[in-house]
Amino acid sequence: VIYGRSDSTINRKGIRMGTSEIYACVEAIDQVLDSLVVDLEQLDHASFMPLFVVLRPGVTLDDALRQDIIQRLRNELSPRHAPDAIYQVAEIPYTLSGKKLEIPVRRILLGDDVEKAANPGAMRNPQALDFFIELASQLAANQQSA
């Protein structure tokens, strides 16, 4: 059973999982307040699935918390849906109506222009995109040097 909308479903190696299930599992961890996951699968490239987490004040993302998140996802949902990387962010970007900006974040991380990927006027917190814009630059630089 898939609980998310069809555009918020991640298909990794033939196993489909709604992002809402991933969020429920991750956000059940006491230290995690909010999360966002995207799959950056492209043609001719391996899938890369980063997870972004907002943590409680005073909590930092260390190796123990990373392993806890990964193990919970593997054990409670699917080993294939464990994230390839976990990033701590200050906030998750939301629309004015309260939906997480999964598709715009995915497009930004894949290299689309921010102006084409997201409409800041339709966002509750447009400054939340700054982290993802910077990460997109880092990912692009890493791909060019690889």
Image (tube, rainbow, N blue to C red):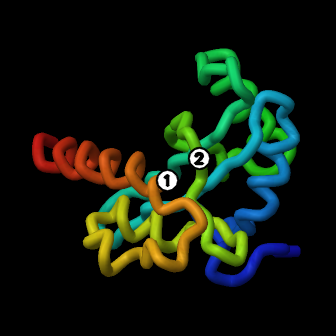
Give SS at disc 1. Answer: helix
In this orientation, does residue 44 appear? yes
Q: Residues within 10 Å of mark 1 (few under 14, many from 20)?
A: some
Position of residue 143 relative to residue 69, above or below, is below
Q: Nearer the viewer, residue 70 or 93?
A: 93
Name the residue carrying label 2.
Answer: 91
Residue 95 position, x and y percent, is 61, 72
- Residue occupying image coordinates x 33% and y 64%: 110
Residue 28 position, x and y percent, is 87, 41
Position of residue 82 relative to residue 92, above or below, is above
Residue 143 position, x and y percent, is 20, 48
| Label pair 1/2, CB-CB below 8 angstroms | yes
Q: Residues within 10 Å of mark 2 (few under 14, many from 20)?
A: some
- Residue occupying image coordinates x 21% and y 52%: 140
Using residue 49 as the reference point, say whether residue 107 is left or right of it: left
In this orientation, does residue 14 appear? no
Residue 37 position, x and y percent, is 60, 55
Q: Nearer the viewer, residue 76 or 15?
A: 76
Residue type at the position of mark 1: Ala
Residue type at the position of mark 2: Glu
Mark 1 or mark 2: whose residue is earlier in sequence: 2
Q: What numbered label is drawn on residue 142?
A: none
Q: Specify the quadrant that holds the C terminus.
A: top left
Name the residue carrying label 1.
Answer: 128
Among the 4 quarters of the image, the one containing residue 74:
top right
- Residue occupying image coordinates x 56% and y 39%: 90
How many tags in the picture? 2
Among the 4 quarters of the image, the one containing residue 29:
top right
